[in-house]
């Protein structure tokens, strides 16, 4: 699956996107965020407050408990503000 990073998540990880194959036990959005944190200090730093990270599965906003299923693209981004 393609994982895309936006805004300060991208800046902290140092990548705009990557293709990853998470282990089978990574079933939910929360599982994915937890697994990504184990990939290195830059991921841990970017996702240290994962409750603030917003996730979209194939361009549809998802909650932490939502299953990843067969998503082909997962986007991670910080909360948005209006102005």
Image (cartoon, helix red, strand yellow):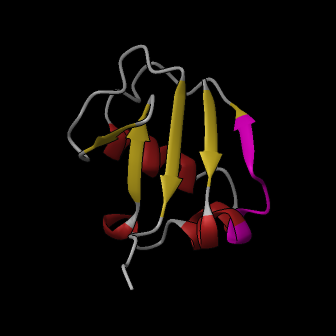
How many tags in the picture? 0
State the residue at coordinates (29%, 41%). Answer: 62
The x, y position of residue 55, in whole percent, is 40, 48
State the residue at coordinates (45%, 18%). Answer: 24
Q: Please, which residue is most extreme toward the bottom here? A: 83
User: In which quadrant will I find the C terminus?
Assistant: bottom left
Q: Please, which residue is most extreme toward the top here? A: 70
The stretch in magenta equals 11-18
The x, y position of residue 26, in whole percent, is 41, 30
The x, y position of residue 16, in whole percent, is 75, 51
State the residue at coordinates (43%, 50%). Answer: 34
Quick one: 13 or 78, which is closer to the camera? 78
**In the visual, does 14 lie left or right of 46?**
right
State the residue at coordinates (51%, 52%). Answer: 76
Image: 20 above or below 77: above
**In the visual, does 41 lie left or right of 1?**
right
The x, y position of residue 42, in whole percent, is 70, 67
Quick one: 19 or 26, which is closer to the camera? 19
Image: 53 above or below 26: below
Residue 10 sits inside the magenta stretch: no
Q: Please, which residue is most extreme toward the right here? A: 14
Residue 17 sits inside the magenta stretch: yes
Image: 44 above or below 34: below
User: In which quadrant will I find the N terminus?
Assistant: top right
């Amino acid at each position: 699956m393609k994982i895309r990073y936006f805004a300060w998540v991208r800046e902290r990880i140092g990548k705009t996107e990557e293709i990853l194959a998470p282990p089978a036990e990574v079933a939910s959005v929360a599982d994915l965020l937890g697994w990504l944190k184990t990939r290195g200090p830059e991921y841990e730093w970017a996702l240290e407050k994962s409750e603030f990270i917003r996730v979209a599965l194939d361009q549809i906003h998802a909650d932490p408990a939502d299953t990843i299923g067969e998503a082909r693209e997962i986007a991670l981004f910080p909360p948005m503000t209006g102005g």
